[in-house]
Each structure stands twice: as structure tokens, then as C-alpha cells.
Image: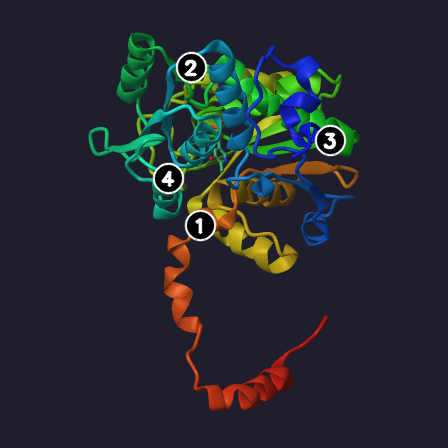
């Protein structure tokens, strides 16, 4: 692979110094138009940054590339991280690439599509455990504290994908912003899903570094919306009692980067929008059928929030929002299991007749 395909090399002068760069071809993701979404919302254009195109299917590859490059450059003996799935897959892949072993604490509620691929990297590369945390599905503070202490005790790179734990590694996400500055300099809004809060912080920071200040819109499920509710003045601090959302990656009632996320959104003159899980899941299906773009539910929260904002009259017709589509749809397929019966098994002798019936019924636009 040529060195210029490595996003960390491309933007090296903007990032912490590295003596070694670990690369799997991350970054350089496409920005595509979403014409059906733009029509539905009634704005000039809507674009999507397809972070699904990263090597392990999510934007976390940018953090993992940075984290493992730092771990190699600074001589750590291993890495340790917590994850709701995507960060774990990214850290395991880049750990394997770098030859640096790791220990991963997965939130108890991780979908199997996010946990099972970890086993492919091998137990000598990544030791994976699932942590339940007092019956709560989310990654919680006690787990974070133990992981932080273990990192210090054993000289492990702390690869948690939050600024509160791994500020230098999180600089890898700034590269989304550097690419957007080239791809969409006239964007007016950036819609990003918010779990722990680090993604929105890094994108806002990277854009400000390029003198761009679009309104940042924090998208959360109503089942766990501490940042949105704090921005709306409904709660005194960026924390809610518990999470009731089923959306993987958005289940952090006390987001460790929540205050920084709320500040970044407020500074950009943006806002928070919360939508319920049903709206997120129907936006996921609609985006796939209307635009051919299949993303995981956390990413679809951006689409649901945009639709809700349009319905609430929050966007003018000259708006040019960008949606950060953070992870691929194949990462969380459980909700489609009930649809499997739609795929019928037929005898080979019936194929021609079935095609004829289908053509007779199909309508083309
Ligand atoms: C697909 C996806 N989208 C969004 C997020 C939220 O990012 P953050 O936790 O930095 O707010 C995550 C975090 O795990 C994620 O995996």
C-alpha cells in the first residue's frame, strides 16, 4: 500500500508526532449526495460521509490507527480498551497489524456481529471479555476506572476511544474534519451520533482548525440523551440516571466526554436532537431502500434527527447538512432476523417462472 493512502501520513503536520505509522487503508472515505433525503427534507443538498468504508466498517479505525501508531512509537508492551463493539474491532485489527497484543472489555450488550469477528484476530492478539455492570447494558464508570488503573500498572496503551482517556489517539478522528474541509467546504450543519461524546468533539475541533464552523447537531436516542437534554436546559449536568435505548454505541448515560461535547455543540451554535429508537430503526431501513446506503442504527440516528429537525422547521431551504454515517449496517443484523422468512426457498425448476412473475409485478421509476 502506498504511504499516501495512510490518512495519518497525509495529515501528519496536523497530528501528534509518530515515529511509526500503523495503517490498514483507513480514511479517505467518500462523501456522497443523498438526493432522496434532500427532497424529503426540502433542502438544497444533503451529503453523507461514508465512514462505513473504513477497513473494519466504522470511523473507529481512525482512532485505532492513531492509538496503535502511538503505542508502537512510544514502546508500550500492549494495549487495553473498553468498547461497545466498533472500537474493539478496530483496536483488534490494528493491534494485529502492529503486532501489539491487547485486552478488550466489551459492554455486555454488544451485538454478535460486533463481538464474533474479534475471535478471528486470535487470542494471542486480543483477549476479549464481556462486562455486565450491575445489569446495565452500557459501559460504566467502574469498568473505566479499572481499565485506567490496569493500563498504568502494566505499561499498556490506554486505547479507550474517549478524550477523557486517550486524547492523543482521539486526534485520529480529526482527520474526518480535514477530509470534510476539502470535500464539503460549504456545509452548514454536521449531524453526528453521540454516545460517549468524543466523535462530535473531534470533528468540531478539526473543522475549527480549518476555519470552518458549521452547526454541530448532536443526535441521541430519547432512551439515553444526556447531551441533548443538557443542551435543552432540561437537566443540570450531562448525565441521566440510566439508558433504556437498545441502540448499540449510544448507551452511555454518563458520557465521559459529555461536557466537552455539549460545549463543542454550543460553540458551533448547533443543537441536540433526540429521536426514539423506532424512528432510528425506520430511518435505517428508509435510508437503505431510498438511497442504497445501509448503516448501523447508531449512524441512522443522524438521518432520523435530520428528518425530525426538518419536520420541526429547524432547517432553511439553503441548508447543506452533512451526515456522519459512522458504521455499516452489517454490524448489527439482529433486528432483520424476523424478515428472513421473506427469502423463499424454491425448486431449481421454478426459477424461470418466478422471474417471469416478478418482472410482471415490478415497477421501475
Ligand atoms: C457507529 C458509532 N456511531 C457513533 C458512536 C458515538 O461516538 P462517541 O462515543 O464518540 O460519541 C459510536 C461509538 O462507539 C459508534 O460506534
Q: Nearer the viewer, mark 1 or mark 2?
A: 2
Give the CA separation, mark 3 to mark 2: 31 Å
The one of 359 and 3 positioned closer to us in this rendering: 3
Of pointers 4 and 1, the one earlier in the residue sequence = 4
* Location of mark 2 (residue): 165
The one of 231 and 246 positioned closer to us in this rendering: 246
* Location of mark 4 (residue): 118
Of pointers 3 and 1, the one earlier in the residue sequence = 3
Q: Is residue 261 left or right of residue 244?
A: right
* Location of mark 1 (residue): 278
User: Residue sitting at 35 percent across and 10 percent down?
Assistant: 155
* Location of mark 3 (residue): 188
Pointer 3 local density, CA inside 10 Å: few below 14, some 14–19, many at least 20: some
Q: Does 213 sit above or below residue 353?
A: above
Give the CA separation, mark 3 to mark 1: 27 Å
Residue 11 is situated, as x and y percent measured from the top left of the image, at 69, 20
* Disc 3 residue lies near ligand 1 with CB under 8 A: no
Task: Return the mark for residue 263.
Answer: none
The one of 188 and 76 positioned closer to us in this rendering: 76
Amino acid at each position: 500500500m502506498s504511504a499516501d493512502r495512510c490518512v495519518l501520513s497525509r495529515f501528519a503536520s496536523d497530528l501528534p508526532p509518530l515515529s511509526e505509522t500503523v495503517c490498514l487503508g483507513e480514511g479517505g472515505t467518500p462523501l456522497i449526495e443523498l438526493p432522496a433525503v434532500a427532497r424529503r427534507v426540502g433542502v438544497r443538498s444533503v451529503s453523507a460521509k461514508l465512514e462505513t468504508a473504513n477497513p473494519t466498517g466504522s470511523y473507529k479505525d481512525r482512532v485505532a490507527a492513531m492509538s496503535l501508531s502511538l503505542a508502537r512509537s512510544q514502546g508500550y508492551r500492549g494495549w487495553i480498551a473498553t468498547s461497545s463493539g466498533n472500537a474493539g474491532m478496530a483496536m483488534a485489527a490494528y493491534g494485529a497489524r502492529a503486532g501489539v497484543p491487547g485486552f478488550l472489555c466489551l459492554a455486555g450488550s454488544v451485538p454478535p456481529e460486533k463481538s464474533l469477528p474479534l475471535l478471528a484476530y486470535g487470542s494471542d492478539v486480543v483477549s476479549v471479555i464481556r462486562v455486565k455492570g450491575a445489569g446495565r447494558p452500557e459501559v460504566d464508570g467502574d469498568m473505566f476506572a479499572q481499565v485506567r488503573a490496569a493500563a498504568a500498572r502494566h505499561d499498556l496503551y490506554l486505547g479507550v476511544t474517549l478524550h477523557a482517556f486517550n486524547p492523543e489517539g482521539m486526534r485520529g478522528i480529526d482527520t474526518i474534519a480535514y477530509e470534510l474541509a476539502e470535500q464539503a467546504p460549504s456545509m452548514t450543519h454536521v449531524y453526528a451520533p453521540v454516545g460517549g461524546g468524543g466523535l462530535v468533539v473531534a470533528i468540531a475541533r478539526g473543522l475549527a482548525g480549518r476555519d470552518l464552523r458549521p452547526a454541530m447537531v448532536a443526535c441521541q436516542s430519547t432512551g439515553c440523551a444526556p447531551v441533548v437534554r443538557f443542551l435543552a436546559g432540561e437537566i443540570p449536568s450531562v448525565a441521566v440516571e440510566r439508558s433504556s435505548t437498545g441502540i448499540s454505541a449510544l448507551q452511555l448515560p454518563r458520557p465521559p466526554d459529555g461536557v466537552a461535547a455539549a460545549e463543542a455543540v454550543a460553540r458551533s451554535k448547533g443543537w441536540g436532537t433526540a429521536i426514539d429508537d423506532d424512528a432510528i430503526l425506520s430511518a435505517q431501513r428508509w435510508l437503505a431502500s431510498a438511497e442504497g446506503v445501509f448503516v448501523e442504527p447508531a449512524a441512522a440516528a443522524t438521518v432520523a434527527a435530520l428528518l425530525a429537525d426538518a419536520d420541526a422547521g429547524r432547517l432553511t431551504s439553503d441548508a447543506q447538512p452533512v451526515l456522519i454515517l459512522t458504521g455499516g449496517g452489517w454490524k448489527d443484523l439482529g433486528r432483520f432476523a424476523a424478515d428472513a422468512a421473506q427469502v423463499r426457498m424454491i425448486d431449481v425448476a421454478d426459477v424461470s417462472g418466478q422471474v417471469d412473475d416478478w418482472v410482471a409485478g415490478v415497477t421501475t421509476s
